[in-house]
Amino acid sequence: MKSGNNLVVHISGNGQGIPVIFIHGFPLDHKMWDNQVEFLKEEYRCITYDIRGLGESPAGDGQYTIELFVDDLLEIMAEYTIEKPVLCGFSMGGYIAQRAVQREPDAFGGLILCNTRSESDNNEGKIKRAASVKLINMEGLETYVTDFISNCLSDISLKEKKGIFDKVISNSIKFDSLGVKGCLIAMAGRTDTTSFLEKITIPVLVIAGLLDKIASPLYMRTITEKLRLSEFAVAPNAGHLAPLENPGFVNDVIAGFLRRRITH
Ligand code: MLT
């Protein structure tokens, strides 16, 4: 269905259950959470959506900030009466989730940070984003997306689950390049949420991928150590795309965290 802010939203599962909102990463869409939604839907109200400019949510003017993505999330929560959800953000979705909790600390019941970072881009990172925008302009989205997603995967996934990831790539190359570039610029301009981590009072689950080169397990452990109420898990046989590369592990860890820590 289409929300009032024109985003594609999917709500499934147990309408009486605790709501869990899944925020996907870049350059992906809500489908990255299919395994988790399927696993959790009997017990939980599962909400996924396509971030502005990705998947089936229209790109609009392509001028995005993480603040705008948080506005979008809060508008979805208000429109569908989603109270005190657990936010589960993967990578760019994690940037949005952290900033949402920082802006509205009382609005959420728990937080799951999956393969993500709290630091903003340094100068090298910003220059890399600019180069990515240039590459998309010069060579088109397909080259960029194929390279980017392939780099996210562990060697094991590239060999053993190639079919799954070919499907992910062929989905993402159809996105509107204006939306993809808008997300790159939004990520380059995001704030640093590191000093906020120790102020978070809700339970947080941190999930890393053992072979993640973008948000390494060592780095994600440093995030966990700053949090008050946290659990930490490292998915084996997974690079940056842990929910897709090792869904069984990620599903079990999320289900365990929700059962133990979230009780409203
Ligand atoms: C993502 O998976 O969402 C991206 O890798 C995040 C990023 O590029 O910083």
Image (cartoon, rainbow, N blue to C red):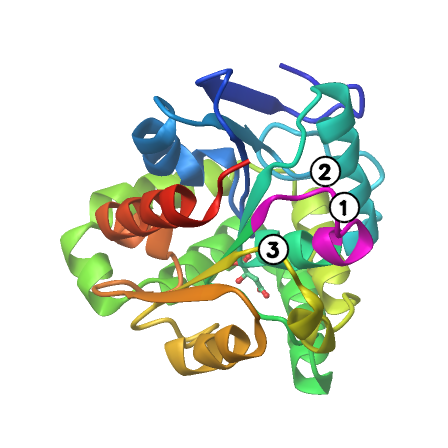
Q: Is any part of residue 65 visible from this angle?
A: no
- Counting other residues with Cα less than 10 Å from the Cα at mark 3, is it few (<14), some (14-19), or many (20 or more)? some
Marks 2 and 1 close (CB-CB < 8 Å): yes
Q: Give the residues drawn in magenta, as a range.
A: 100-110
The residue located at (51%, 35%) in the rendering is: 30
Quadrant of the rendered structure where residue 138 is? Answer: bottom right
Left or right: 242, with 126 as reference point: left
Residue annotated with mark 2: 73
Q: Give the CA distance from mark 3 to mark 1.
A: 18 Å
For mark 1, does the 10 Å Cα neighbourhood hold few (<14), some (14 to 19), or many (20 or more) residues? many
| Residue plotted at (70% across, 62% down) | 187
Foreground: disc 2 or disc 3 = 3
**Closest to the observer, 34 or 194:** 194
In what element is the residue under mark 3?
A: loop
Q: Nearer the viewer, mark 3 or mark 1?
A: 3
Q: Which mark is residue 115?
A: none
Element type where label 2 sits in the image: helix
Q: Decide: is 82 above or below 164.
A: above
Indicate the position of residue 165 as horizontal and vertical percent values: 31, 47
Q: CA distance from mark 2 to mark 3?
A: 18 Å
The residue under label 3 is 202
The one nearer the camera, 221 or 174, is 221
Give yes or no for residue 120 being in the magenta stretch. no
Residue 58 place in picture, x, y as percent: 71, 30
What residue is shown with label 1? 70
Q: Earlier in the sequence, mark 3 or mark 1?
A: 1
